Image (spheres, rainbow, N blue to C red):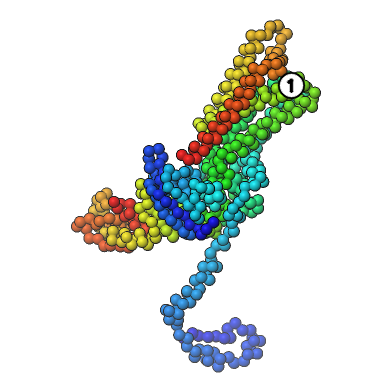
Amino acid sequence: MNEIDLERDLTEAQRAELGDLSAVTKLLVSYEVADPTPSETDLLLAKLKPVLAERTAPEPIESPLSPSRAFSSQAWLGVARAQIEILPLGFWLAGVAVGTLGLFVGFAAGAEWLITLIVLLAPLLAAGGVAYTFRPETRGLEELERISVVGPLELLYIRLGVVLAFNGSISAALMLALGLGGMDVVQLWRLVLVWLGPMIGLAGLALYISVRWHTIAGTIVPLVLWAGAILFGWREIVARVEWTPATSLYRVAAAWLIAQINNSDGLLLAASIALIVGLFLMQQAGQTVMRNRTA
Amino acid sequence: MSATNLTVTSLTKFYGAQPALHGVSFALNTGSTALLGPNGSGKSTLLRLLATLISPDAGEIRFCAQNYAADVRSVRAHIGFMPQEVDLPHHLTPYQILRYLAQVRCIPMQHDMTIHETLAALGISHLSRTPLAKLSGGQVRLVAAAQALLGKPRLLLLDEPTRGLAPDERNQLWHAVVRFAPEIMLFSSHNADEAEDRAERLLIFRGGRIRFEGLSETLKARAADHVYEVRVPKAVAAVLQREYHVSQIRDDGALRTLRMVGTPPDGVESKHVSPTIEDAYLWLMRSP
């Protein structure tokens, strides 16, 4: 039997108001409440269980995915924008720095220098950019990317497109500067082909080697190949030019390059072949990615 | 899509001439399933096949009646996968990685909120702007878990999700999984207790084939006659430990109590005990 003290928490004023509570206390104490039977306990627990489970279960999170997501052009743009976001800031700054340097050289040293810079550096920048973008450090992410509505092939080409578009826009800005500066020493379409062919060729080579083997090889092979082409051109210059003490090597080389761009159909043919080979290698890289997926 | 179920029929995968999975078939309805088995038994291969990362050499997978081979893209929209090996770019932050994957997976554009919600569910929202290079291995694994949960996938696949996690991180991960409530979850583990605690069903693999499929209680019931305890002097215990499969050792003064799986050794007094899930797993692995 429990002891009951009804007056315990009352103030003096309340006690005075309520009077003698001993009779009430005696009555309460006289009540006998039976302990619950095991079945009553089980019944109570059964009733409480769902309520308790509901109150303690973590709140579910609503899915933002609709069961059938149409792949809109906005979504494609989102994927392309995402590629920009995951490349480190340094990558973009390096490209912008080269572009700015080109502009500076163009206005300070003349159109010949700017054209030389565009033709010689753009393929290297593109190949380096592609090899960097597809370096092994991004492979872990690649696996997670593959479980998406966008296929691995689309992702490869979107990423490649973003890098090439960036490199292309730097060269395009420099060419625009050439045009605006009135430095029309070359035919623009011939310059574009001589610039674009090797750029796509070396970028395709860098991509194929990086995807197929390793990004280091993907950087070195195009670099060596391009250095070989430049050396070959240099030998041509050395063989054809009559040297005098007043001859400026670099000025002669730049003038020779511009003459080649304006007059050499062989150079245009070589640039066109490089362009086709580059596109073919990009397609082969895509096939390699698809083969790796099913391996 | 129709009612949530996952059906795998005669699934076979070879790596070169080496079979990784051999005619595996099972069907799962809503709920969680743990994949147990030794290394190389086919757990990860199965999860990678279900995640569409690799293609089978034979057999068929259907999720909600949708054949993987027929339209893999529509299936991918519903899959979340956490790989066993996590190798994410170190210069990126958890927020950047999740944002990138949200964009690639076309998760609608309110995903900033989704990303924060996912990171918060895993208890790493305070690290959202810290580059991965500065995070611990366990924290990076939680980021990998977050990307798997991102978008609240209907089919969640986790390959050894708690490997390398501290107890509180493990707890956080499972708590998040409960919150995201995938319709079907499959996870692989080397921890039989964890598998029993977190899954409703078990799929146990050996040599690329399913050795057991069902409830943990069923497996324990099957192993009931094969688990026993012996209490022997320490010198004898040392011999028994070498010769028999001992799942637990307890020192008891000069004596040692061994919990053993298999057939009791002759001449040693033994008593049968109720098998734990680990005992039952060990018994199954030893069975021919």
Q: Secondary structure at mark 1?
A: loop
- Can residue A266 be spotted in the picture? yes
- The answer, for residue A207, to whether it is visible in the render is no
Return the residue nearer the eye: B158 or A29: B158
Whole-percent x, y for residue B276 in the image: 36, 59
How many labels, in total? 1
Please provide percent x and percent y for residue B271.
Answer: 26, 62
Observer-nearest residue: A106 or A207? A207
Q: On the rendered structure, is B241 left or right of A101?
A: left
State whether residue B224 is above or below residue A48.
Answer: above
Q: Residues within 10 Å of mark 1 (few under 14, many from 20)?
A: few
Image point 47% across, 46% down: which residue?
Answer: B48
Viewer-closest of B123 and B75 = B75
Task: Judge left or right: residue B79 versus residue B25.
Answer: right
Would you say A253 lies left or right of B8 here? right
Residue A198, percent from left and from top: 63, 24
Using the rendered view, name the quadrant where residue B28 is placed: bottom left
Residue at the location (79% across, 25% down)?
A181
Q: Amino acid at mark 1?
A: Gln
Q: Residue furthest front?
A: B70
- List x then y, in percent, for residue A100: 72, 29
Q: Along the horizontal axis of the image, is B49 left or right of A98? A: left
Chain that bears disc 1: A
Q: Which residue is mark 1?
A: A187
Q: Residue drawn at (19%, 57%), measured in percent from left and top?
A: B267
